[in-house]
Image (cartoon, rainbow, N blue to C red):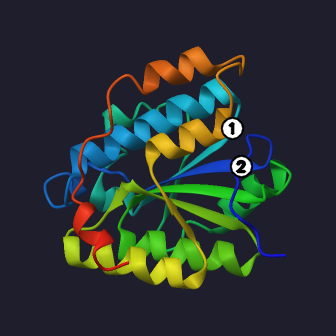
Amino acid sequence: MASIGRLSTKDAVLLLCDMQEKFRPNIFQFPNIVSNAARLLKASRVLGIPAILTEQYPKGLGPTVAELEAGDLTAYAKTSFTMMIDEVEKQMQALGNPKQAILCGIEAHACIACTTYDLLEKGIEVHIVADAVSSRSQTDRLFALSRLKQSGAFLTTTEAVLLQLVQDAKHPNFKEIQRLLAHPSPDTGLLSFFSAL
């Protein structure tokens, strides 16, 4: 039976892809993308979901932006367009090979796409957080999301992920998650995408 894509805290890993300083001026909706990713990272800490962070050629593209608040994570440097480098593969194995990946970062048509294909080929369910991924061009971003949906990834939003992970207002961490939802996610220009779905 095909998976319906129900997220679970015990089977998931949060993947944070290449949200670096040099991308700041060029990525469509960059501040809002990072803000949403930062909320996902805060929620992952509350809910005990491990997080893995990569940086694309940090020598040239700079470090992860401070507002992600990921300073406690090891940043795995890479040159490939997939996050699934040897060090990340080893980290996934050390985590017991999570069955679900919650994926955010940049760029949608490059590193997010290549990571998604690799994860799907390994049989890992991929949840792309559409309002926490972007590209330099909105065209590349929207076509990438459409293409990745065709490949079998689930498209979701920051708020949807947080609510699916707690599932009940009686969840012991619901109040902390609710605080992360106090302000709705900013519009990151996805509404035009729905006319094409």
Say whether residue 87 is left or right of residue 27.
Answer: right
- Give the vertical position of 88 relative to 82 (above or below): above
In front: 139, or 112? Answer: 139
How far apart, in angstroms, are the residues tagged by discs 2 and 1? 6 Å
Image point 20% across, 51% down: which residue? 24
Q: Are marks 2 and 1 in contact (CB under 8 Å)?
A: yes
Q: Position of residue 176 (x, y in %)?
A: 55, 17
**Residue 105 at x, y = what percent?**
41, 56
* Residue type of the residue flagged with mark 2: Ala
Q: Which residue is mark 2?
A: 12
State whether residue 138 is above or below residue 40: below
Q: Position of residue 73 (x, y in %)?
A: 56, 37
| Placement of the C terminus among the 4 image quadrants | bottom left
Q: Quadrant of residue 119?
A: bottom right
In the rendered image, is residue 48 in sight?
Answer: yes
Residue receiving disc 1: 49
Mark found first going from the N terminus, 2 or 1: 2
> What residue type is disc 1 on?
Ile
Residue drawn 22% across and 55% down? 22
Q: What is the secondary structure assignment of the residue under circle 1?
A: loop
Report the quarter where the N terminus lies. Answer: bottom right
